[in-house]
Image: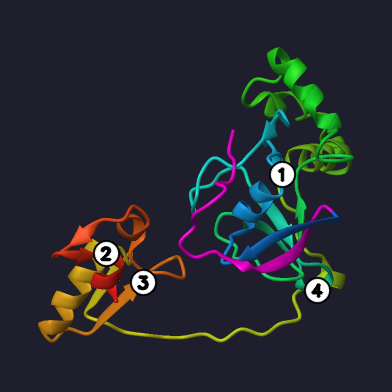
Amino acid sequence: MSHRLGTGGRLIDRTRPLDFTFNGKTMRGYAGDTLASGLLGAGQTLVGRSFKYHRPRGIVASGAEEPNALVGLGEGQRFEPNQRVTTTELFSGLKAVSQNHWPSLEFDVGAINAKLWRFLPAGFYYKTFISPRPLWKHVYEPIIRRSAGLGKAPDAETRDIDRYEQLYAFCDVLVAGGGVAGIRAALEAAQAGKRVILTEQTAHFGGRAVVDGYEIDGQSAESWID
């Protein structure tokens, strides 16, 4: 089972506590936490339900590859569904809600599907609910979407009220990933006179080399990257 380490955390400042809520319950993390580490630190290991059988699911990864811990963030006109807790930086006042369950995360009626697995093979609904045709739109589809859907899309009343900037950029070399290999490739291309864009999905460069404490050219990975 996933859990939070009692010490360590290169980016965590344990002198700066942050309060947030998960399913209406107030919890506490620290500056530098992800929502994932904040949840684990608060003892919240159950974060969602599986897509089809609604089995209980916890956090299994640490980045964008996390398949289970998808939540809705915010509320009202600033609500965003399907956000990964492993890539969401914790901030004071953050509000998160779990998805794909009813009536609650801990007690989900949809979990009965796990008992009926013999009758729910892949693709069964395409044949079972194809007729009578009028029932598909008004009965079958709404029920299936409600039971198997993930996040709830904002409706017209809660549509996003923010505006976003767009950037158009051009380069000779585009490097995907700001780990050690990506930084070295970008540096050498730039030194060769190329226009370079280095992209990184997280807020910090270095990747696993920094986290695992490797040395590069006789110095720590963090110092080398700086």
Q: Which residue is mark 4?
A: 77
> Horizontal placement of 107 versus 203: left or right?
right
x, y percentage for residue 81? 71, 59
Q: Earlier in the sequence, mark 1 or mark 2?
A: 1
The dot on residue 91 is none
User: How many C-alpha atoms fall within 10 Å of the one at disc 2: few (<14), some, or many (≥20)?
Assistant: many
In the orientation shown, which residue stands out farthest toward the top?
118
Q: CA distance from mark 2 to mark 3?
A: 19 Å
Three-letter code for the amino acid on which mark 3 is drawn:
Thr
Image point (86%, 41%), residue name: 104
Amino acid under disc 4: Gln
Residue at position x 89%, y 40% in the image: 103
Q: Which stretch is magenta?
A: 1-23
Q: Residues within 10 Å of mark 4 (few under 14, many from 20)?
A: some
- What residue sits right under mark 3 in the picture? 199
Q: Is residue 121 left or right of residue 72?
A: left
Q: Amino acid at mark 1?
A: Gln
The residue labelled by disc 1 is 44
- Mark nearest the camera among 1 and 4 is 1
Residue 13, percent across and down?
57, 67
Q: Quadrant of the N terminus?
A: top right
Q: Residue at x 37, y 85 (%)?
A: 169
Q: What is the distance, in whole Å, between disc 1 and disc 2 at their CAs?
A: 33 Å
